[in-house]
Amino acid sequence: MLMLAAGLAGCATPATPTAPATALPTTPATTPATATAPREVTPIAPEGPSGWTPKRVVRAPHDMIAAAHPLAVRAGADALARGGSAVDAAIVAQMVLNVVEPQSSGIGGGGFMLHLDGRRGTLAAYDGRETAPATADASLFLGPDGRPLPYFDLVDSGLSVGAPGLLRMLELAHARHGRLPWPALFEPAIRIAEEGFQVSPRLHLSIARSVRRICARPAAAALLLEPGGCRPKAAGSIMRNPELARSFREIAAGGADAFYRGPIAQAVAAAVHAHPERPGRLTEADLAGYRALERAPICGAHRAHRVCGMPPPSSGGIAVLQTLGILQRFDLAAHAPGSLDAVHLVSEAYRLAYADRERHVADADFVAVPVAGLLDPAYLGARSALVRPEASMGIPAAGRPQGDAGHGEEPPRQRPPSTTHLSIVDREGNAVSMTSSIEHAFGSLVMAGGFLLNNQLTDFAFAAADPAGRPLANRIQPGKRPRSAMAPTLVFGPDNRLEAVLGSPGGSVIVQYVTKALLGLIDWKLDPQQAVDLPNFGAQASATTLLERGTSLEALAPGLRARGHRVTIVDLNSGLHAIARDGEGWAGGADPRREGTAMGSTRREGSAMGSWQREGVAHGDALR
């Protein structure tokens, strides 16, 4: 937990973690494969497009929630109106999202949460990332020839399923910061799962894009497809999930233990082992042994603000702060958002941050991650000197920060994910920024208890070492948490007051989406809706620069190519949800690329708890 009273002077990063003395064994059962993939990879859009719906900024005086589906936002706002905390609202909204956005997140996956205790002035980072089974080793992803199996063969398999962490994380956060009773937090999701909801156009399109995958998995097909064929549920049709409602009832009554032990855990392990082509290794013991963790957040200065994010095993916080640090010497405010110079400079900073990510960042309970060295201002200054205003660096090299453990460099690999993000502020000044995921669209398609299980183990490196024999930091090990790019973020002003809450889905591109919004809020002085609306662009550890299809950025392609960029036009479908201080109230923005909304709530004076009016609903009162 981090105290905020020290202001910007307290932005020191945590000491570099070291591998624990009792780390689980790492010797593979077979000869480890080595990483030989090329540096350039074909870009894959994180999620398919579902159109652009213009949205207006939402303002409310006391509290706010911004999340990925109107039903989840309403349920979270109702929890706030009943006197619930930001954590209460996050749990309510997440359970509803499990029902209405099954392709993106749920109790079969994991997540990360940043929490601000407004009264105490403390900031905590909660880690609910999945863990590898106790029997996992370097052979997990290898075929009979000793080479890594194709990515999508692993995704749709039992091999990709890690021990879910979301419920343990939410239970831990609720025990410390919740106000409403745990069982009450499941009531809206249970009602929607039993009574049904209208399939949204986005969910319909997600099912249609994965219909062949889904059709091959009877349990998933029964939920997501029309009866008697391989046709996706139509937009506007009613989807019900009574089995998930039953699971929710058990968890509401018995706490997270009802998920990690007993019939639900048995069903999860059985489903993973029963996969017809590639059964997995997750066991009931793996589930019973799962622990959510509280970690120290990492913070850094940007202009006059302090930006705080998640530490490893997420790389999101480090990469966002590195990008901002590399850009410190450039006056971005002098360049218009979406200008050639701004896109060039920010993309170059991304390249350097991602190169460091691939070499240095993984689960710090298993490998030494040089967090302090990566965020040291002198190191970032030296990295920034590699950015040339007139020409791209092309393929970047990882740096050698203080504390470098000498790991090999993991080749970049596109990981098309399905993820969600919630941003919440309550009337007591508490805040939650939470990103959760089951990884690929509909996860592994392994289903138990009415929910889909994750394929998060494919976030590990598929090889154990690089061609030189140096171990990869993100290699799979028993009990280890795979590296993530999730970047739930909180921003504080010079007076140490909370200024913004934000985050996004998007897989490895999350870093770019969140950084874009931060630059919009801080450097370009935009409101949260304007910052979210900005066209997306970016780069990773390669010479390729991505520009969002159908935006004004496409016109920059010739100028960027003249500076040495390899330009690719793609769909970049962020799902940003941002809340920013607006005088003494709050302003919220929801990404027009998806179906989320923002909403505030307030109790009527003199009325009993539970009687309230809602404020600031994006799009009026329409549920799309």
Image (tube, rainbow, N blue to C red):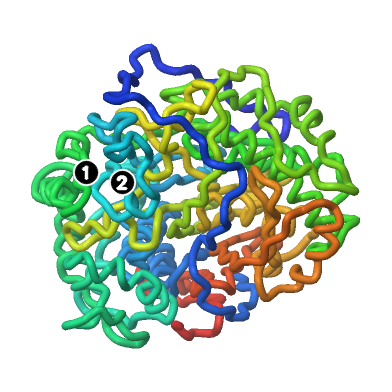
Residue wearing tag 2: 160
527 shown above or below 425: below
107 shown above or below 354: below
Q: Is residue 516 visible?
A: no
Q: Which quadrant of the figure has residue 457?
A: top left
Contact (Cβ within 8 Å) of mark 2 with mark 1: yes
Rendered location of residue 540, percent (x, y): 64, 47
Give the position of the C terminus as an image quadrant.
bottom left
Q: Give 398 or 195, whichever is nearer the viewer.
A: 398
Q: Which quadrant of the figure has residue 29?
A: top left
Q: Residue furthest top?
A: 21
Q: Give 608 or 619, whichever is nearer the viewer.
A: 619
298 shown above or below 316: above
Circle 1 crowding by C-alpha within 10 Å: few under 14, some 14–19, many from 20: many
Q: Earlier in the sequence, mark 2 or mark 1?
A: 2
Residue drawn where x is 53% and y is 60% of the image: 44
Q: Is residue 186 visible?
A: yes
Q: How many marks?
A: 2
Q: Which mark is residue 280?
A: 1
Rendered location of residue 54, percent (x, y): 62, 80
Residue drawn where x is 30% and y is 40% of the image: 143
Say what secondary structure mark 1 lies in: loop
Circle 2 crowding by C-alpha within 10 Å: few under 14, some 14–19, many from 20: many
Q: Is residue 506 left or right of residue 511?
A: left
